[in-house]
Image: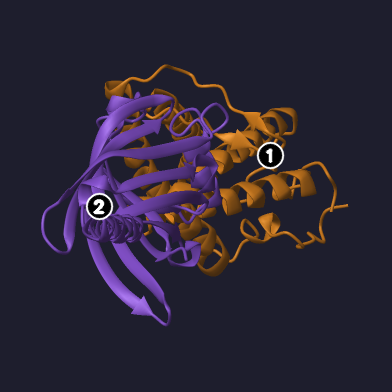
Amino acid sequence: MRKGSGFTRALLALALIAATAAAQAKSSWKIDPSQTHVGFWVDAIGWPRTAGEFKSFEGRIEIDFDRPSRSRVDFTVAAKSVDANSAVLDDYLRSEAFLNVANFPDMRFISTSVEKRDEQHATVTGELTLLGVTRPVSMDVEVARKLAGSKQRAGFKATGIINRLDFGMNTGYPLISEAIHLTVTTEAFSEP
Amino acid sequence: MTLRNTRESWGSVAKTLHWSAAACIFAMLGLGLTMVHGTLGAGAKFEAYQLHKSTGFLVLAVMLARTLWRIANPPPAPIVGTRPWERRLALALHLGFYVLITAMIASGWIMVSASPLPLPAHLPGGFVVPNLAGPNALLEARSKFIHEAVSKLLIAAIGLHVAAALKHHFAAKDTVLLRMLPFHHDHRSP
């Protein structure tokens, strides 16, 4: 019995350690809006590059640094928050010709797989919903971990190109390129 | 100064219309050249184009008023001593302005209408100017060519117009320039 009870205790202890480790490994991270920038740019023939950003967004990140494939990203951007440094141009981008914000207020990206390439790089594939159309999109993500005081912080820079024609955004094509370049930089901190 | 033209001088309506058109056209040429050839960012360039389109319809309104006023109210007589060829040249140049400005407005309106990126001009009060044609890249390219070519002719015509006015004032020392100036009173007029 003594032996048996010791074995059971050892098993329990192992299970506890494993559970704790698992809980620590997969952690929920909150995005710091002040350190987040959702940017885009698009080229057009005979026109300077149009660059802008979306000011309003929310997102959740679940990161498992030990098993990156278990990480998840869910990011929602308010289409009407577009800012291309011109109120007149912003209104045009919000119109039916482009973002059609009256009918499609949100753009959403939900990851489906995360593939670690090396210590600092991962490829995040997911589904992007834009203008009510959902298509797979891949983003290259650069990760930097750092400690800020007692909190863990992680910086991410995600870049990707989407083909706006896939989402039915055809206005001005081919004068305005079909390729929309996205760059999302963000900093997230682990929730205690 | 009277509202209507007299035999000797321009009335205040004609003067106001002349200088309003001059101000609009100078602004439009400056804006047009800047937005096409200047190094503006995408947002500023977009705003300049929209302003140029809207102002184009202000020019149209001024030119319609000018044309109607010109028909309703004959211009002052040529000054004494004007030779027949000078009179014909002046008339041709003045008529030329109406033709060139009309061509600028028409080609600009057609260009906006035929653009593959349909974006009609917006006027104050929320009024949206209707398009004259559907998207048509060839029509857009042709009207753009005309718009640019006529703008150069218009600049040349303005140069001649200003040179002629200065020649009247400084070389011939007559009242042709003075009688179009805003606050000039012709003492010979009643």
Q: Nearer the viewer, residue B107 or A145?
A: A145
Q: Are marks 1 and 2 on the same chain?
A: no
Any part of residue B87 in sight: no
Using the image, determine if residue B2 lies above or below residue B177. above
Residue B8, compared with residue B140, is above or below; it is below
Indicate the amino acid at tag 1: Pro
Query: Which residue occupies the foreground of this view, B55 or B50?
Result: B50
- Direction from residue B179 to residue A127 in the image, left or right: left
Task: Estimate the x, y position of residue A62 in percent, counting from the top left.
Answer: 36, 52
Taking the view exactly as shown, the residue that stands out farthest to the left is A118
Q: From what the image shows, is residue A8 above or below residue A176?
A: below
Task: Give the chain letter at badge 2.
Answer: A
Q: Measured from the top left, where is residue A187 in percent x and y?
A: 38, 65
In whole angstroms, how far apart are the C-alphas of marks 1 and 2?
41 Å
Which one is nearer the viewer's eye here, B93 or A143?
A: A143
Look at label 2 and name its amino acid: Thr
Per the rendering, the colour in which chain A appears is purple
Q: Residue at x 33, y 20 (%)?
A: B136
Q: Which mark is residue A39?
A: none
Q: Which residue is mark 2?
A: A159
Where is residue B77 shown, x and y percent of the image? Answer: 67, 42
| Residue denoted by label 1 | B124
Residue B41, by quadrant, is bottom left
Residue A156 placement, left or right of A38: left
Q: Is residue B81 left or right of residue A107?
A: right
Asked where in the image residue A16 lies, by quadrant, the reply is bottom left
Pointer 1 chain: B
The orange-tinted chain is B
Q: Which dot, 1 or 2, sits closer to the camera? A: 2
